[in-house]
Amino acid sequence: MQIDPICGKRLEAEAGAPTAEYKKRRYYFCSDRCQKLFEQRTERSRMSHLAKVGALLSNGKVRWGLA
């Protein structure tokens, strides 16, 4: 039994069901819509993390926000 991380529905892990892998874990979804929302959120989280790491490793003054 799996749980859709977007809508919370309980699912049976079936062949052909929408899935995604994130940080070495497989997630199952009730629909393609939930899968796409999950992928958008994880990409946003990943880009935010990369920006923070880049700011920590850069030389000089770091400016956050718009000029």
Image (cartoon, rainbow, N blue to C red):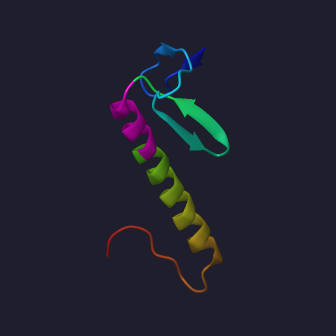
| Prevailing secondary structure of the magenta residues | helix
In this view, the residue in front, 53 or 46, is: 46
- Magenta stretch: residue 34 in it? yes
**Residue 50, image x and y in percent?**
56, 64
- Magenta stretch: residue 35 in it? yes
Q: How many marks?
A: 0
Q: Is residue 60 left or right of residue 67?
A: right
**Residue 32, image x and y in percent?**
36, 33
Does 10 sit above or below residue 40? above
**Residue 20, image x and y in percent?**
52, 39
Residue name at image x 38 percent, y 31 percent: 34
Residue name at image x 59 percent, y 44 percent: 22
Does 67 sit above or below residue 37? below
Residue at the far front: name it: 15
Residue at the far bottom: name it: 60
Does 48 sit above or below residue 20? below
Q: Quadrant of the N terminus?
A: top right
Does 53 sit above or below residue 34? below
Asked where in the image residue 67 lies, by quadrant, the reply is: bottom left
Residue name at image x 40 percent, y 46 percent: 40
> Which stretch is magenta?
31-39
Residue at the far right: name it: 24
**Residue 4, image x and y in percent?**
49, 23
